[in-house]
Amino acid sequence: MTDRTETMPTSATTMRGAPAVRIDRDPFLDLRTHMDRLFDGVFGSMMPFGEPFGWPRLGRVEPMPRVDVSETPEALTIKAELPGMDETDVELTLNDGVLTLKGEKKAEKEEKDKDHHLIERSYGTISRSFRLPDTVDPEKVTAGFDKGVLTVTLPKTGDRKPKVRRIGITGTGPA
């Protein structure tokens, strides 16, 4: 049996310049960033109402809410973090075995008298969908909202079991 132990560098000279974490670079993302900078430099002052050619900025991609999915013998539970929203901002639908969560965080009224030094809070829409297993009873799904967390409980049916059917294979080609 061979020992497959890897050794870590021990001296400061071998560690100098090494990244703390591995960063996988996407060459297409790099190209897009360079193209954005080029267009910003050339067309930036001429585009007061948006991005050149309607391209969205990379930082404005529609976010997906963070979720926890857990399962017990009786039910599946999905908990979604929706900070800054309340239950009136959220829509939950179930269609053909797909649970879809949509929400919108609306911008607060702008205060004209304040000089803002930094604005990092985000506003906009979120969306996330989940394909549910056949064992979920769609008529008994419930949802609750408390302190920015949406909890969806998806009870299982007791009688539905995945049906397995053996399919015979013939040697004469397609049937």
Image (cartoon, rainbow, N blue to C red):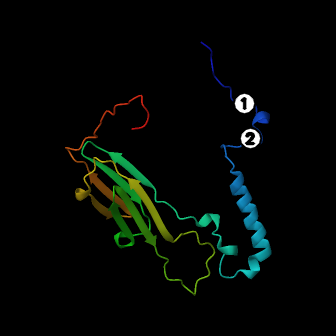
Is 132 in front, or is 1? 132
Amino acid at circle 2: Ala
Q: Are marks 2 and 1 in contact (CB under 8 Å)?
A: yes
Element at label 1: loop
Q: Which residue is mark 2?
A: 18
Q: Residue at x 78, y 68 (%)?
A: 38
Which quadrant: the C terminus? top left
- Say whether disc 2 or disc 1 marks the residue closer to the N-terminus: 1
Is 65 in front, or is 175? 175
Classed neighbour count for the residue bearing mark 1: other residues with Cα under 10 Å, few (<14), some (14–19), many (≥20):
few
Residue, far top: 1
Q: Residue at x 42, y 58 (%)?
A: 129
Q: Quadrant of residue 45?
A: bottom right
Percent coordinates x, y for residue 65 in the rendering: 46, 59
Q: How many marks?
A: 2
Element at label 2: loop
Label of residue 9 in the image: 1
Q: Does 104 sit above or below residue 99?
A: below
Classed neighbour count for the residue bearing mark 2: other residues with Cα under 10 Å, few (<14), some (14–19), many (≥20):
few
Residue, far front: 172
Residue, far bottom: 113
Amino acid at circle 1: Pro
Percent coordinates x, y for residue 50 in the rendering: 65, 78
Which quadrant: the N terminus? top right
Q: Residue at x 33, y 48 (%)?
A: 133
Does residue 13 appear to the left or right of 101 in the view shown?
Answer: right
Rounded to the nearest angstrom, the CA distance separating label 2 from label 1 is: 10 Å
